Amino acid sequence: MKGYLDRIEENQHAVIIVEEINKEFILPINQLPKESSAGSYFDITIDNGKIISMTLNENETTSQQQKVDDMMSKIRKKNSVSKFKKN
């Protein structure tokens, strides 16, 4: 199962979203794999409603970040075109 680090709250708690089961988990940040940051994707094992293992999925993280970067580039390009005629 995949999850992603949505945010870190108060520099103490990590909010992990698992869309497949439409659930949010809150963990102490010391339980995150090293090199984790907001937007990181993980391979997660859940048992009895709790995360029992979590490993950083660098390929998924990179892929998703590239999608976001591409969308932002398109938005910036679209917004840079003026709606007014130049004289």
Image (spheres, helix red, strand yellow):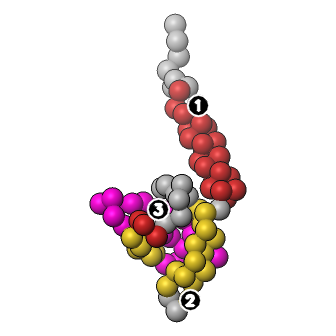
Name which residue lies at 61% across and 68% down: 55
Sequence order check: which comes first, mark 1 or mark 3?
3
Which amino acid lies under the numbered mark 3 shown in the image of this protein? Asp
**Disc 3 element:** strand
The answer to whether the residues at label 3 and label 2 have Cβ atoms under 8 Å apart is: no
Residue with the mark numbered 2: 47
Residue 21, label in figure: none
Which amino acid lies under the numbered mark 2 shown in the image of this protein? Asp
Which percent across, then down, holds residue 40?
Answer: 55, 58
Sequence order check: which comes first, mark 3 or mark 2?
3
The quadrant holding residue 28 is: bottom left
The quadrant holding residue 1 is: bottom right
Residue 6, label in figure: 3
Which percent across, then down, holds residue 53?
Answer: 57, 77
Please rate how many residues cluster around mark 1, counting C-alpha atoms within 10 Å: few if below 14, some from 14 to 19, many from 20: few
- Distance between the alpha carbons at the discs numbered 1 and 3: 27 Å
**Disc 2 element:** strand
Q: Which circle, 3 or 2, is nearer the viewer?
A: 2
| Most foreground residue, 17 or 57 | 57
Residue 2, can we see it? Answer: no
Residues drawn in magenta = 1-23
Q: How many marks?
A: 3
Residue 77, label in figure: 1
* Residue 11 sits inside the magenta stretch: yes
